[in-house]
Image (spheres, coloured by chain):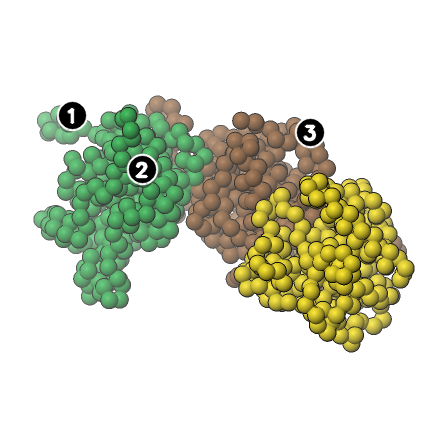
Amino acid sequence: MAEVSLQGEQRVFMTGNEVVAWAAVAAKVDIMYGYPITPQNEIMHYWTRLAPKYGKRFLQTEDEISAGFTMLGGVMTGRKAFTATAGPGNVLMQESCVMAEMMRLPAVYVIQQRGGPSTATVIYAQQETQLTCFGGNGEGHRIVFSTSTHQELFDYTLKAFNAAWTYRFPSFVLGDGYQAKMREPLTIYEAAARGVDLVPTTPLVGEAKPGQFKHLRNTYNTEDELYEVVMANQRDWDAMAPKVVEWKDMHCQDADVVFICHGVVARAAVGAVEELRAQGKKVGLFRPITVRPFPDKQLADAVKNAKKVIVAESAYGQFLKMVDLALCGSKVERVPVLRPGIGITTEELVEEYNKL
Amino acid sequence: MQEVRENNVLQPAMPKCWNEETKPHKFCPGCGHGMILKALGEAIDELGIQEKVVFGCDIGCSLLSWDFFACDSVQTHHGRTTPVITGMKRANPDIIGIAYMGDGGGYAIGSQHLFNAAVRNEKMTIILCNNCNYGMTGGQMAPTTLPGMKTETSPYGRDVEQTGYPTKGPEMVAAVAPEGAYVARGTVANIRQLKGFIKKALENQLAGNGISFVECLSSCPTNWRTNAKQTWEFVEKDMAQYFKVGELRTPQAKEGK
Amino acid sequence: MAKVIKIALAGEGGQGVQSIAEILAEAANEEGKNALYIPNFGVEQRGGVSIAYVQISDGAIGAPKFVKADILIPLSPRAVKRTKMHAGKDTVYIYDNSLVQEAEVNDNVVGMQYFDVTPPCPTADEANRDMQQDMIAGEPKTCSFTKPGPGVDPADIPENVKKVIACPANDIAKNELHPRVFNIIILGAIIAATEVLPLDTIKNALEIKLGDKFKANPQLRDMNFKALDRGYELIKSAM
């Protein structure tokens, strides 16, 4: 079977879901587990078309609970595996996410957010930000990349696999329905062509040597026993956070007003900043790429000279909470633009600025 | 069976694949889990597959078996052992995947996984301990609680009008699994037969025929609040009367074999 | 900051607006421009209006959707009503003034969430015959409405836009060409209104998209190119 499908690099024009499938090919993923839900379906559609050509596999499970747990089984055997979901499927998958947190499993989830709560719309939202970062009965030891362009969708899907296998925390690519369904150009590439090293995988179980057996534990008998484990994870998390945290800023140094957004909404803010700067307005943009771990120090630093910040998101305050926490103690005035389940355009952000 | 003498007392030997460091085990006195796991251990020994086994245990009393064997093992979540082992076997078909669970894990919270693994004929072995109640959480009604049986959540006896009849798991699996499946119900009251069923179930996985599922009728004197005599009577008479012991599905011998 | 041209197309399921939006965006990409295309998708239902958003620029493109379009093209009476919010003072407004009415979308597409699945032609004898079978290798499916009706109510046409152009694409397709090339006339109209791409680029894109069909039936190529030219000239003369 052919191992590599992608050779060199190639400029393409495709949907975000297709981008994710190609990124998984570039990451040399062995198997995808999935269950149908809009708007992520085409990740499975493209993967099931690509996978057999390269000796890769797919399992359609009975629900998202199973998609999450079969994926955990897959990574435990040292195979690169992932799943993708959205909305109510993301809710069901949280059970497997916390097991991955606790047992330090290199799980990768691609989330294409849709409108909530409940079934709501199949279209778009940023209402799974808190769920993806903190859903479940744990401390949210997860790496969450919030992408904004198709190029990032490719780059960070690749990165999510590397992060998962390097740090053994579950890693998430937080996209949305718009990114899933829109088409725009990007360059897809073979990892080696860009000097990206793919982190090697190792089996956690299933290749035992006589007398050396592994017992992966998930249940603890006493409070102290659990405390030790969680604290060890927390220490690893704290040591890792500065290495994986990513953000982008734009004209923050001299800005009076800074837009703070994540994901696809940041695209609108880029447009707004360019338009307003062209009119001589002192505006900037700060955008966390990792919403978990959150670039809190970097954000506080970026807005230290600003008078106001406009926090815009397609949810009612899920991202704002993270920003508020990071800016705790700062006097900068927060102007929230909260639009649950609906897109935010450049024009609307310019208008919000003009209202100040 | 091998026997050794220790302190002048005749003792049956532990299966080789048992993890000696974790013995004596953690189950209550009179619990059936230890007997099922002994039958399983002997089957693993006889097939010589100790290094290839990945043993997954569910939540409930079955979780206490997480370090029971000197085999790779993993604890999962309640009901989720079937998908975890499914995922492993799909990713690495060379392992021998064993999912070990109770009746709650298999027939209630994880029933969709059991049903669909059977429909897909996953090449794995599922061993399910049926003791008619949720043991670890303190003896609540389970899918397998017998009609009229008293539990913490059916204190006046299971009312079948309100709560339905006990789940017949092997019958369900046998009904939906395609050709190649092995399905049986054994009992801790006949350990020789149970071990035979479990061994056949593992052989069926080794042959790559399809799913193999063995339900084991087991005892829970702690929650049943029974003495030794009553416990055995319940397993041998009451349970066996409702849950028929025997093989429900065996794979057809392939031509030329 | 490079100018971004914003185009919104809206029509009934089966009119092929998503197909031409995709061809347009792909052609722009081939031309080395930045292009972004996003369909509105959701739970398909009776009377659903399908909207396609396309943006083309020499520079970066911001949010995938926008409020006010530079070119707004509603292709059915219902689409005219549904897209009012996208009409602004800088909008060139092109609508179909043929005397037709939209047919009901067949029940069996209710619940589909895959935007590439073009709902079946509402007027076809067998509703499902027009459905795309393969999601990747599928060809764009389109048809015009041949059911006579009152057409667009003039009162629904927004005022205070830059320019309003009526284009009887439906009638032209039906009377002069073929109902199936209705959307290609519209594609020609968009090129004329925006001049964002040379007409030849679109012809190349059609060649890539429908090459196999063209090979099997060269008449199809002529008809598509004729439709493209017809739409282009129609708007060019009106601009």
Q: Is mark 3 on a helix, strand or loop?
A: loop
Residue lying furthest top: A210
Q: Which is in the foreground here, disc 3 or disc 2?
A: 2
| Foreground residue among C124 and A82 | C124
Percent across and percent down for residue A128 are: 57, 55
How packed mark 2 is, by other alpha carbons closer than 10 Å (few <14, some 14-19, many 20 or more), is: many
Q: Which label was assigned to residue B180? A: 2
Q: Is residue A126 left or right of residue B236?
A: right
Q: Circle 2 marks a residue in which chain?
A: B
Q: In which quarter of the image is the C terminus of chain C?
A: bottom right
In the structure shown, which secondary structural element does the residue marked by tag 2 occupy? loop
Which chain is disc 3 placed on? Answer: A
A88 relative to C6 in the view: left or right? left
Q: Residue at x 61, y 34 (%)?
A: A26
- Letter of the green chain: B
Q: Chain A is shown in which shade?
A: brown
B255 or A218: which is nearer to us? B255
Residue C127 drawn above or below residue A185: below
Q: Which mark is first along the chain, 1 or 2? A: 1
Give the CA distance from mark 2 to mark 1.
33 Å
- Residue C25 visible in rendering: no
Q: Mark 1 points at which residue?
A: B2
Query: Helix, strand, or loop for circle 1?
Result: loop
Q: What amino acid type is highlighted by mark number 2?
A: Gly
Q: Which of marks 2 and 1 is in front?
A: 2
Q: Which residue type does callout 1 highlight?
A: Gln
- Chain coloured yellow: C
Residue C152 in picture, x, y percent from top left:
75, 71
Counting from the top left corner in percent of width and height, residue C227 is at 79, 53
Q: Which amino acid does label 3 sit on?
A: Gly
